[in-house]
Amino acid sequence: MVAFLGLAAVAFGTPAAPAGDLKIVKAEGAEKKPAVNYNHEKHNAVAPDCKSCHHTWDGEGAVKKCSECHKAKKDGKALGIKKALHKACKDCHKDQKKAGIKTGPTGCKDCHKK
Ligand code: HEC
Ligand code: HEC
Ligand code: HEC
Ligand code: HEC
């Protein structure tokens, strides 16, 4: 996780992160739980490096949805959407909670909010 979050920062001229809450797009066929909110601004202090999440992005062009590659099931090398996004999101909240740091939700219904 540390290595995953430690990738190089991007240069000037990058598209801005969307303001406010966004609903992460569901993968087709993986739609059991309510979609999860993500707010870039609320994460600026802890996850400032765009490419720690947008790990296939060149830092200039359009930013792809995670579900374009992370499908309902593992596809080639790409983990299924649940495993990939739990790794990118839930693991940090869990680690920080364990360390006693104020962090985001770790309970299913607190992320998958109706
Ligand atoms: C902790 C993970 C994380 C970090 C860090 C992060 N993002 Fe995102 N970003 C997301 C997720 C998740 C989405 C929603 C994508 C989806 O629906 O598949 C998103 C969506 C976006 C979108 C909209 C893409 C679209 O759907 O059109 C843009 C643009 C974007 N991010 C830019 C950035 C930039 C610029 C940074 C760095 C300042 C950044 N992001 C940092 C997780 C992150
Ligand atoms: C263009 C395709 C593509 C997009 C878009 C994409 N991924 Fe991935 N992702 C992959 C592939 C392929 C792998 C496996 C190989 C690798 O690690 O690069 C992977 C691996 C991962 C891993 C596992 C890394 C590890 O430590 O093993 C995580 C977590 C992840 N992606 C999260 C995300 C998130 C979050 C988004 C959206 C913000 C996203 N991915 C967007 C293709 C993609
Ligand atoms: C590096 C650690 C880290 C990562 C990675 C991370 N978070 Fe968080 N998250 C936090 C912290 C810290 C807070 C508390 C921020 C605050 O309250 O100011 C938080 C707060 C939240 C909240 C509650 C605040 C709100 O917006 O309603 C949600 C929901 C959330 N995160 C979802 C996500 C999702 C979805 C992802 C993956 C795309 C993600 N987080 C990735 C650390 C992280
Ligand atoms: C930190 C936030 C977070 C927590 C906590 C969390 N998830 Fe998720 N989960 C996500 C994200 C982000 C996705 C990918 C986007 C989506 O499908 O909404 C996802 C996807 C999934 C999927 C695949 C999509 C679907 O709807 O079928 C399932 C199933 C799932 N989670 C179950 C759970 C369960 C069960 C728990 C509790 C044990 C849980 N999640 C806790 C963030 C979270």
Image (cartoon, helix red, strand yellow):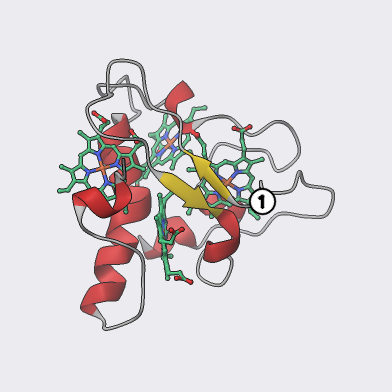
Residue 92, how many percent across, how many down? 33, 63
Outermost right residue? 13
Q: Tell me which image quadrant ligand 2 sits in.
A: top left
Residue 47, how many percent across, how many down? 52, 63
Outermost bottom residue? 100
Seen at 29% across and 55% down, the residue is 90
Q: Is residue 94 left or right of residue 85?
A: left
What is the three-letter code of the residue carrying label 1? Ala
Seen at 35% across and 28% down, the residue is 78
Q: Which residue is mark 1?
A: 19
Closer to the camera in the image, 76 or 84? 84
Q: Is residue 48 visible?
A: no
Figure quadrant of residue 76? top left
Figure quadrant of residue 34? top left
Q: Across the whole image, how many numbered discs are drawn on residues?
A: 1
Residue 89, how many percent across, how many down? 36, 53
Q: Is residue 104 left or right of residue 108?
A: right
Q: Quadrant location of the C terminus?
A: top left
How would you rate the neighbour count of disc 1 (Cα within 10 Å): few for under 14, some for 14-19, many for 20 or more?
few
